[in-house]
Image (cartoon, grey):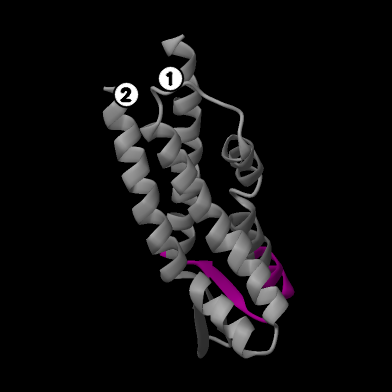
Amino acid sequence: MLIWLKAFLLIGASISFALGISLPLMRFESFYVFSTDASLIEVVVSLWDGGDGALAVLVALVSVVFPLAKILLVAAEEIAGSQPARPDALARLLPALSKWSMMDVLLVAIVIFATKTSGLAEAFTQPGLWFYAGSSLAVAALSALGRRGGIQKT
């Protein structure tokens, strides 16, 4: 039963991640006439096109590359679950990536809060934010189940 739960979480995390970076994260409305939607990919491309290459690379690393690497590392860890664990660079990398898991969700929440309190515009969460958060939570749950499963095997 545990293997099916892990498979469900891994597939769900992967699909949610893809939807989370491609669907709009938030919508801004100003004066009830103008509205703007932005996905994570559009934000990175917009930053790059706007001449903020360093910021675009930083956002892409933290928002896309690190979470994708974490999903792949957790999947690899689950596939190699029966093999004895060895302390290598990959085993040390997963906890470091885990620290960045929900940072983007927190930043979007802060932007929405700041926009709503400024009075100049209204901000609304969009499905991309929820899928992105769901992906982070699914990977965290999968990682916790992996540790728990490893403890039970010994």
Q: 10 Å neighbourhood of mark 1: few (<14), some, or many (≥20)?
A: some
Q: Say if residue 119 shows up in the picture.
A: no
Tell me where residue 3 sits by quadrant: top left
Q: Quadrant of the N terminus?
A: top left
Mark 2 secondary-structure assignment = helix
Q: Which residue is mark 2?
A: 2
Q: Find residue 151 and report its horizontal and vertical position in percent.
A: 49, 14
Tell me, yes or no, whether the two marked residues, 2 and 1, touch with CB atoms within 8 Å: yes
Q: Is residue 71 above or below residue 37?
A: above
Q: Horizontally, is 21 left or right of 50 in the view?
A: left
Q: 10 Å neighbourhood of mark 2: few (<14), some, or many (≥20)?
A: few
Residue at position x 63%, y 82% from top?
A: 47
Residue 82 lies in the magenta stretch: no
Q: Find residue 143 and report its horizontal and vertical position in percent.
A: 49, 33
In the image, which disc is placed on residue 134?
A: none
For marks 2 and 1, the one nearer the N-term is 2
Q: Which residue is mark 1?
A: 149
Q: Is residue 112 above or below residue 6?
A: below
Q: Find residue 56 and report its horizontal and vertical position in percent.
A: 64, 76
Mark 1 secondary-structure assignment = helix
Q: Which range is magenta?
A: 113-127
Residue 125 lies in the magenta stretch: yes
Q: Horizontally, is 146 left or right of 61 in the view?
A: left
Q: Which amino acid type corresponds to the residue marked 1 in the rendered image?
A: Gly
Residue at position x 45%, y 34% from top?
A: 77
Q: Is residue 148 above or below residue 78?
A: above
Q: Which amino acid type corresponds to the residue marked 2 in the rendered image?
A: Leu
Q: Find residue 148 and report its horizontal and vertical position in percent.
A: 48, 20
Tell me where residue 105 sits by quadrant: bottom right
Residue at position x 40%, y 31% from top?
A: 80
> Mark 2 and mark 1: span between their CA atoms?
8 Å
